[in-house]
Amino acid sequence: MTAEQRLGLYRLVLLQRLFEERALALYRQGRIAGSFYDGRGQEAVAAAAGLALGPEDVVCPLNRELATHFAKGVTVTEAFRNFLGTGDSPTRGRDGNMHFGAPERGVFPLVSMLGDLVPVTVGAALAFKRRGERRVALTFVGEGAFSVGDTHEGLNLAGVWQVPAVFVLQRNHFAYSTPTLGEMVNTRMAERVYGGWSIPCETVDGTDAVATFDTVRAAVERARAGLGPQAVEALTLRIHGHAAHDDGAYVSQELRDAYADRDPVDRLAARLALDGASTTQLEELRREAAAAIAWGLDEAEASPAPDPSTLEDGVWADPLH
Ligand SMILES: Cc1ncc(C[n+]2csc(CCOP(=O)(O)OP(=O)(O)O)c2C)c(N)n1
């Protein structure tokens, strides 16, 4: 990875961190309906996986992967529009959450049913293989999603068909409030993916953005080269609760202490300093990211509300007409 690429990675982790801090404040002001699901502690994985893909590749991000959207060209304005439910948002105000994407830029919208993005990703990768295209499809799988059937049916077929798919297994210690050991008896997800489905899987410290990029990029290139499905197990901590309505009181102090000096944004800043970046340069990058967030939010706030007359659009088709 070049120093220039590391700078790009830093911009992405900062964008996710600052976007989510702003969105959490908006949620608390009652401006975001439902809840807000942030990925604090996991930004490195989202950014690294997004950057490891080419423009021709497709990705199915989950709700903690905003930086993946940004890496694939989704703008801060589009993301804020979706959360604020504006009429010109990607979902035209139907969703105030993460169920948005940009299929023309290779970002498939989130399917909320845990595990279902695995077969979707395998389907995209199968299409690439059948058309002889050198493209890769990538998705993410948490511990909760790894414990449902659709995930394993998808992984099995990925192996049988040897499709160019990459699965990033996010081990962030929790599925909602259930700790990993309450979810699975063998917590070594890499071992299970290889032992069960013969999908090679490397484990990486998911708070180290550079190491995660190198590992995911290598997996993407192996898949692109025709070596079949690949996986990466990223070890992280979901620092906040499941979402803004959950204070995460069940995340033990011991676990928080273990991750106290592993903040992905700070770690990457330290790495950039080793590359020669000065404190002033790092502050400038943070100012640029903060300005991009403020500008995007201003644009989204100037967007119109959905037109009430379109309420039933896309909901009901009368089979007799
Ligand atoms: C099939 C299904 N069951 C339950 C839920 C409710 N639910 C949404 S997110 C979640 C926990 C997800 O945990 P994990 O897959 O580990 O991802 P993380 O939230 O840690 O990123 C649950 C239980 C769901 N969306 N789909």
Image (spheres, grey):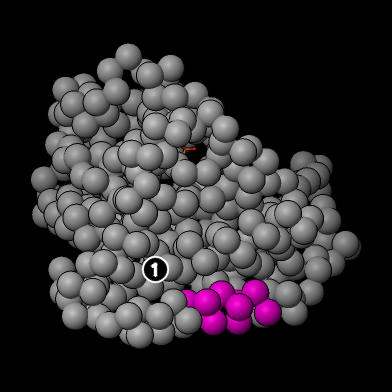
Residue 245: image quadrant is top right
Residue drawn at the location 54% of the way across and 82% of the way down:
291
Viewer-side residue, 126 vs 78: 78
Is residue 15 a member of the stretch shown in magenta?
A: no
Q: Residue 241, position in %: x, y?
A: 56, 39
Q: Residue at x 48, y 62 (%)?
A: 17
| Image side of residue 320 versus residue 256, left or right | right
Q: Is mark 1 within 8 Å of ligand 1?
A: no
Question: What segment is highlighted magenta in the picture?
Answer: 289-298
Horizontal relation, residue 53 to residue 224: left or right: right
Above or below — where is 63 with respect to 57? above
Q: Main secondary structure of the magenta part?
A: helix
Q: Position of residue 33 (x, y in %)?
A: 75, 51
Mark 1 lies on a secondary structure that is: helix
Towards the viewer: 171 or 276 = 276
Give residue 201's position: percent from left, percent from top.
18, 37
Residue extending farthest top: 185
Q: Residue furthest right?
A: 309
Q: In this rendered view, identify the residue nearer to me: 40 or 185.
A: 40
Question: On the rendered structure, is 70 left or right of 134?
Answer: right
How crowded pointer 1 is (Cα within 10 Å; few <14, some 14-19, many 20+) is rated as many
Res. 311 in view = yes
Does residue 258 lie above or below 83 as drawn?
above
Q: Nearer the viewer, residue 192 or 312?
A: 192
Q: Is 90 rendered above or below residue 287?
A: above
Question: Is 296 inside the magenta-drawn segment?
Answer: yes
Which three-letter amino acid code belongs to the residue tagged 1?
Leu
Name the residue tied to disc 1: 12
Quadrant of the drawing holding the N terminus: bottom left
Can the viewer see residue 197 in this picture?
no
Q: Quadrant of residue 301?
A: bottom right
In x, y percent, where is residue 249? 57, 32
